[in-house]
Image (tube, rainbow, N blue to C red):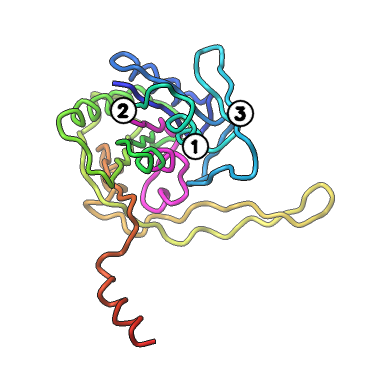
Amino acid sequence: MRILLSNDDGVHAEGLASLYEALSQDHEVTVIAPDRNCSGSSNALSLQQPLRIQKMKNGFYAVNGTPSDCVHLGINSFLDDDPQLVVSGINHGANLGDDVIYSGTVAAATEGRYMGLPAIAVSLCNYQGGHFDTAGQVVRDIIRRLGEHPLPADQILNVNVPDLPHDRLKGLQVTRQGRRHRAEAMVRGQDPWGREIFWYGKVGQEQDAGEGTDFHAIANGYCSVTPLSVDMTAYQSLEDMQTWIEAL
């Protein structure tokens, strides 16, 4: 299978190299990734600057753009043959609950789906790295399953893997997104010239983390597999909204 591999931690990230090593055992893998860390970039596209692509000594391609740029460029212009699957990761740190809104890892997979391809985002739930090999094996297993049962056309898979040896992983659970509390206050400071600056504070603690959520699966030693829809329409609200609009 031809796989386009990207990430949001940048082309030099350990998780990217580890996933390439795992997937290239069975597949033809091309790596196109940002030339720097783009964590938190969500689905941003670089519309105000040209994109440049550079081949690295290890054969990976670095782009001066976002994760979404990398996937779009790879599929729409750079690659001679379209990939058959887009994989994004392995992210350094979890993408659980509300995280998916901001995640460049998830966005790269979403861009693949917008371009008509099945896509997987995978994250290891440890910012310091660790058992990337476990996450790589999980993705290999999922890809084999996708060959037999393809994803629906409007969905991607968001995969989170606990930082455990593979033989200690309890299994895989299909989950829904949990939800966090409101994020902590931003950190106020000053730059060297005395001008006021702000840093983002810590993410909120888990609010909805009960059984069935991605948070709960990870906390109990399971890999979380959450199908995400790229169509964000709130279908359950269409009828009520129609009534609301007609009353204007």
Residue marked by disc 1: 67
Residue range in magenta is 85-110
- Residue 150 image offset from top left, x and y in percent: 20, 35
Check disc 2: other Cα within 10 Å, few if <14, some if 14-19, many if 20+: some
Residue 52 is marked as 3
Q: Which residue lies at the image location 38% right of the left edge and 55% below the top edge?
A: 206
The image quadrant where one finds the N terminus is top left
* Residue 113 as seen in the image, left or right of residue 15: left
Give 119 or 127, whichever is nearer the viewer.
119
Q: Which secondary structure, mark 1?
A: helix
* Residue 57 as seen in the image, left or right of residue 152: right
Q: Which residue lies at the image location 32% right of the left edge and 54% below the top edge?
A: 231
The first of marks 1 and 2 along the sequence is 1
Q: Amino acid at mark 1?
A: Pro
The image quadrant where one finds the C terminus is bottom left
Q: Which secondary structure, mark 3?
A: loop
Tell me if residue 121 is in the magenta stretch: no
The first of marks 2 and 3 along the sequence is 3
Cα distance in 3D space between marks 2 and 3: 24 Å
Q: Which secondary structure, mark 2?
A: loop
> Which mark lies nearer to you, 1 or 2?
2
- Asked if residue 126 is positioned above or below residue 204 in the image, the reply reads above
The first of marks 1 and 3 along the sequence is 3
* Residue 63 as seen in the image, left or right of residue 102: right
